[in-house]
Image: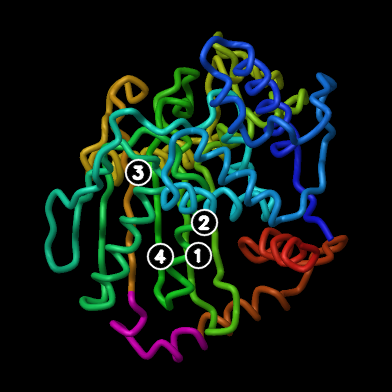
Amino acid sequence: AAGAFGAGVAATIAFHRFVCKRASGSAGSEERASRCPFAHSGSGSSASPPDTVSVPTQELETLILDALKYYGYPEDEARAALEVLLYAEKRGNNQGLIKLVGKGLPRSRVAGSIDVEQQGDSTALLCGGQNLGMVALQRAVDVAVDKASRTGVAVVGLCDFSSSTGALGFYADRIARKGYVGIVMAQSPELMAPHGSFEPVFGTNPIAFGIPTGDREDPLVFDMATSAIAWYGIKEAAAAGRPIPGGVAYDSQGRLTTDPAMALAGAIRPFDRSYKGSHLALMVELLTGALMRGAMLDKWAAHNWSATVLVLSPAAFDTRASFVGRVREMLHRVKVAKRLPGTSDVPLPGERGTQRAAEVARSG
């Protein structure tokens, strides 16, 4: 059996075939090209990739690891990034393998150690040392969970990184599976315009919540960008050669566009196209960038993005069992709530993605 993955995988494979073909023709690059994971993964046809491809999960994991090592990551960092990318791809989230398209995720030449800059009993600030955001944020989550296990509440910040953290739901899920409540938010460069403007000022500024629902149950995970579309959703549309939805982005002149190339040169709108989404994005910007020493101006050039992790132990307020029981009561109320005509289901956050990931796991 094979898992079915979207256009991100097809585009990624096509892209890496192209890169390896180019690499093999440049001086002194034979050894590098021979290590390229997609060099011999197909016919090498220049035809456009299909909308979906089916790839056995184990094979895909191997290909991703090889690609990340090709980009310069050691084994432990490659495996850390693999977890985040697969979490998204298996759920149909556009924070997955599309990140390997274009310039990809090359390891920074100045990457150093991830250090604790300052800390207290329930707080810490980590310096990411220009490591991959997916690697550095996992370290921040681990520090936060450790502190919350001893103090009941922990807030940990991360600064000094300038690459994608991937789907924040991965980190919220990881926290919740350990029995804690997690809230994770991240700043990114200027991609989204405030309401009433078409100048990019905010990042897509995602925020994710993870709530435990029982030892044998998947956590409840809500993961959203405060923008109308994720940056990599536009990149994925561009790679697949299809338009983006209407009303989600401006071109560089402030005109609404469905052309992903024009949107990439312009700005994304807030998720609700109003001041509320814009203000929520601002709050994420301030609780990450301003609070955790991230850049506020020219974030692309500053190479200093930031993230914030909040971990709460239910045991600090009541027994974990009582908390989980009340969570499950509310989730049940939502699912059995009276439905409007024509509505087949009342969804919970992350429900479709979790179901899709389970199907991929069953099919292999």
Image quadrant in which you'd find residue 333: bottom right
Tell me the residue that label 2 is attached to. Answer: 169
| Residue under pointer 1 | 173
**Label whose residue precedes the other's in the sequence (4 or 2):** 2
In terms of depth relative to the viewer, which is nearer, 357 or 282?
357
The alpha-carbon separation of the residues under discs 1 and 3 comes to: 22 Å
Residue mark closest to the camera, 1 vs 3: 1
* Kind of residue at disc 1: Asp
> Do tag 1 and tag 3 residues touch (Cβ < 8 Å)?
no
Which residue is drawn at the image coordinates 81% and 42% (left, top)? 53
- Residue 207 lies, in percent from the top left, at 45, 50
Which kind of residue does numbered mark 3 sit on?
Answer: Met
Circle 4 residue: 182
As helix, strand or loop, the secondary structure at mark 2 comes to helix
Residue 165 percent coordinates (x, y): 44, 44
Q: Secondary structure at mark 4?
A: strand
Question: Gap between marks 4 and 2, in whole Å?
Answer: 10 Å
* Residue 348 versus residue 80 in the image, above or below: below
Where residue 67 appears, as percent x and y from the top left, is 57, 38
**Residue at the image point whose x is 45% and y is 36% from the top:** 278
Determine the image quadrant of residue 231: top right
Q: Residue at x 31, y 56 (%)?
A: 140
Secondary structure found at label 1: helix
Amino acid carrying label 2: it is: Gly
Residue kind at label 4, given as amino acid type: Gly
The residue at which mark 3 appears reads as: 283
Q: Is residue 330 left or right of residue 206?
A: right
Magenta span has 319? yes
Label 3 secondary element: helix
Q: Which residues are magenta?
A: 313-325
